[in-house]
Amino acid sequence: MTTKPPRRLLNWAVVLLLAAAAGFASVEATRISLEHSYKDVLNTEAKRRAIEIMGVTMNGNVMGSVASLGLISKKIKEVASGQKSAQDPEVLEVLQETGKAFQATGVFIANSKGMVQSSWDSNGKPSTGLDINFRRYYKIAMQGKQNVYPAVSLATGQRALYFATPLYGEVSSTAPVIGVTVARLNLDRVDSILKAWSGPALLLSPQQITFASNHSSWIEQMAVGTTPEQLRAIRALKQFGTTYENGTPKTLPFDLGQEIVSIDSHRYAVARAPVQWNDPNGEWTLVLLGDLDELMPSSLRTVIFTASSALILALSAIFMAWRERLQRANTARDQAEAELKTYTLKLESDSMIKSYLAEVAADLHQAGSTVEFARIFMHHVTSRIEADYGAFYLWEEKSNHLIPIGGHGALPDELQQIKMGQGLVGQCAKGRTPINLSDDSNTDIRIVWGNGKIAPKSIVILPVVSVDHLLGVIVFAALQSIDSGKRALLDAMMPMVAINLEILERNLNTQTQAEILARQQAQLLDTETWYRGIIESAPDGMLVADENGVIILTNPRVDEMFGYRSGFLIGQKLEILVPDDVRNHHPKLREGFMHTGTTRDMGVLDKELRGVRQDGSEFQVEVGLSRLPALGGHGMCVCASVRDMSQRRKDQV
């Protein structure tokens, strides 16, 4: 006789089946939830890293520096327009310093026809003379747009980023574009961002070409298949060198058009974010792949399955664990979004500061004096940082004083000269370090307000220093606090102010020296004119010879005396006026004219001296010599007075 299994065993079987079903359901539900949350985080991360790529390219220091060269550098404009040699040392030095400062492999200037006028290249082979008119980055920049153009260098065959900005004819972004300034960098900045991602990462061109990736084998592969027409269009661009000249390019071993792809038996979520580089062919795309299998390793599956198969308490515990994990994922997403927002705001702030500094630098560059320089600077900055008081002191090394050249919100007679180390301003100059004060009424600084004066709430004193050389001190004060943002703007402005002030002082010194030289030359010309007037109006024959015995000036009487037409004797040797036998017997005459630097007597040489006329006839002359100062760049000169003694001799006879 058989017996039925106890009911308890059946119930346990049902419980085990339900527990197993609950375990499988919990595992699957957890996987789906985690993957959904992870996709949101992955999309946010892709956007953040895309903005980071744009931050180190379009909004980075490289683009700002190249744009500044194209806006304010006069010498670079002259090279681009052909007014200055491509080998100008100052221009080559600027290109080299810019390239080395940002680890560029090349920096060059192209004119309006696309020819490279001047260049610097890290490999020692400059690109001067190359035609880049076909390059898209050149055409985009000639339209007045900054752009980052990824391409394969025709010179090196390496992938590179071309930072191209318009080169304006004037110091204004509204002026006509006369050329393009370009910096070529390798892909290290982009590659480092891709390599920082734990999973696979790719940078796709608008043509769906893998231009960069942390998987080197994927580079140059297509994300999708191409038609013959598309392949011809890619080749015509010449953007990717000779990579696609022959054959059909390889395609990635997975379809990026799907939200989830499988690579080496791993499931990956796909996230995309645009990279705006002003490419007319379309947007570049950053693609990040996140490993979904890492979210649910086998150990976690076992724990969830076991916990889900237990009693209600265990199921509740599993539910709470799931909720906690989900909350962590949401927190991570919120944190990533907050960091992205903060980073975006910082990029916007940095971009505004750089734009503002370029505007101020352009205005300061127009200043014709230090007073005008101070006025322009105060006009810009006091309103920008909401300062109620400003003073600009220029350091004068000769007097060892700081000289006030401009102010704002202060009476002119209150801005006095200050010695080095005297007061807060003098201490700032001596230590060459900024001084910040808040709610300090013990200073001498007072803001003129209506008919009265008010002590400031916040004071900032900044030294203007260029390579450890003190140029001046600037003081700002306000009735309200000068916050950290305004202070950061002031700190960013000081190097720019120092450079422009140093350039202005150098230009003013050059102008002063030129004016002194012009006055000296005018005085010399007046002196020479005076001498000429005396000599030409003298009743006796007069001539002037330089230290080499060459005649440089005669009067009409001496020309007539020796029978020459006016001006003929200029440039002739003195020997033309005396017979050969007289020359050889009167060495003192030769010394007087030929060696004027001696200390011998320069009085009357010889009352029996004979002269010779142009027709060869001889006559008795009396010659007196006197030394003259340098005349017209001829060095020390000698003036000779010549008197015809023929008639007197006849009368004596």
Image (cartoon, grey):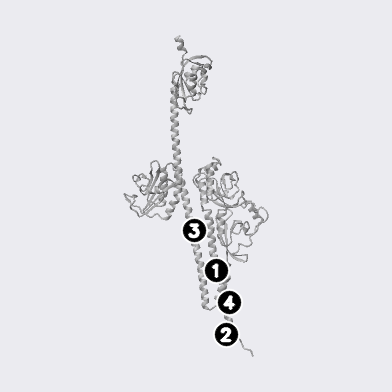
Q: CA distance from mark 4 to mark 2?
A: 20 Å
Chain-order first, disc 1 or disc 2: 2
Location of residue 97 in the rendering, given as x and y in whole percent from the top left corner: 52, 47
What amino acid does circle 2 point to? Arg
Chain-order first, disc 1 or disc 4: 4
Please say if the residues under marks 1 and 2 sit with CB atoms less than 8 Å apart: no
Residue occupied by mark 4: 21
Location of residue 301 in the rendering, given as x and y in whole percent from the top left corner: 57, 72
Of badges 2 and 3, the one in the foreground is: 2
Chain-order first, disc 4 or disc 3: 4
Helix, strand or loop for disc 4: helix
Helix, strand or loop for disc 3: helix
Q: Quick check: 17 above or below 144? A: below
Chain-order first, disc 2 or disc 3: 2
Q: CA distance from mark 4 to mark 3?
A: 46 Å
Could you classify mark 4 by the number of other residues whose Cα lies within 10 Å: few (under 14), some (14-19), or many (20 or more)?
Answer: some
Q: Quadrant of the C terminus?
A: top left
Helix, strand or loop for disc 2: helix
Q: Quadrant of the N terminus?
A: bottom right
Residue occupied by mark 2: 8
Nearer to me, 17 or 616: 616
Q: CA distance from mark 2 to mark 3?
A: 63 Å
Q: Is residue 251 left or right of residue 340?
A: right
Q: CA distance from mark 1 to mark 2?
A: 38 Å
What amino acid does circle 4 point to? Ala
Please say if the residues under marks 4 and 3 sit with CB atoms less than 8 Å apart: no
Determine which of the numbered discs, if any, sits on residue 34 in the image. 1
x 40%, y 44%: residue: 394
